[in-house]
């Protein structure tokens, strides 16, 4: 019984290994990915000039490199048709999205702490108006 369920999960021998993608679509997508990758690398480098900015800048820089590498791998796949290159491109792109998810979570945490800090400071000064009056 277990062997039957395992054999039904295996792909059929006649199923295609890689989806058919137009070279024009791949070219346009990889060009956009490389452009956005360079943007993320530059922005990450600029963010990293400050200590607090480095919390977001370093992951932006790394994700930009992954996105750019993925674009190059999609280009290589479009030229050669090698399914291993497609697998590599998708793997690099999934790493980009994983890093972007981490960046989003860190940014949300920073925003929440920033709002909480602003509220605490506002409440402090509202309860002590004599501190800022001369």
Image (tube, rainbow, N blue to C red):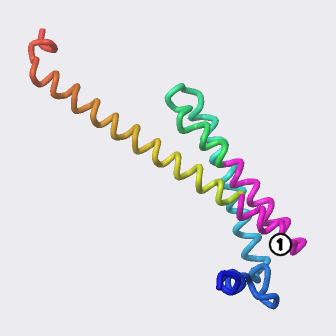
Quadrant in the rendering for residue 30: bottom right
Quadrant in the rendering for residue 84: bottom right
In the displayed structure, 127 sits above or below 8; it is above
Secondary element at tag 1: helix
Residue 90 magenta: yes
Q: Main secondary structure of the magenta part?
A: helix
As drawn, the residue found furthest toward the front would be 1
As drawn, the residue found furthest toward the bottom would be 14
Which residue occupies 65% across, 86% down? 1
Q: Nearer the viewer, residue 85 or 29?
A: 85
As drawn, the residue found furthest toward the right would be 80
- Measured as percent of width and height from the top left, residue 14 is found at 81, 91
- Measured as percent of width and height from the top left, residue 89 is found at 75, 63
Which residue occupies 14% across, 12% down? 131
Which residue occupies 22% across, 25% down? 121
Q: Which residues are magenta?
A: 64-91
Count of numbered circles on the image:
1
Quadrant in the rendering for residue 13: bottom right
Specify the quadrant that holds the C terminus: top left
- Measured as percent of width and height from the top left, residue 37 is found at 68, 52
- Measured as percent of width and height from the top left, residue 27 is found at 77, 70
Q: Nearer the viewer, residue 31 or 102?
A: 102
Residue 87 magenta: yes
Task: Answer with left or right where residue 84 lies relative to residue 42.
Answer: right
Q: From the image, tell me which residue sits under label 1.
A: 83
Which residue occupies 52% across, 46% down? 103
CA neighbours of label 1 inside 10 A, class few (<14), some (14 to 19), many (20+): some
In the displayed structure, 15 sits above or below 84; it is below
Task: Answer with left or right where residue 26 lies relative to residue 94.
Answer: right
């Amino acid at each position: 019984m277990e062997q039957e369920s395992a054999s039904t999960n295996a792909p059929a021998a006649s199923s295609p290994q890689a989806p058919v993608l137009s070279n024009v679509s791949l070219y346009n997508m990889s060009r956009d990915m490389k452009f956005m990758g360079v943007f993320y690398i530059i922005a990450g480098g600029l963010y990293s000039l400050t200590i607090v900015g480095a919390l977001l800048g370093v992951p932006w820089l790394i994700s930009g490199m992954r996105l750019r590498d993925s674009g190059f791998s999609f280009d290589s796949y479009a030229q050669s048709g090698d399914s291993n290159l497609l697998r590599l491109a998708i793997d690099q792109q999934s790493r980009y999205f994983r890093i972007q998810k981490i960046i989003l979570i860190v940014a949300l945490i920073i925003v929440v702490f920033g709002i909480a800090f602003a509220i605490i400071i506002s409440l402090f000064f509202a309860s002590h108006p004599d501190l800022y009056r001369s």
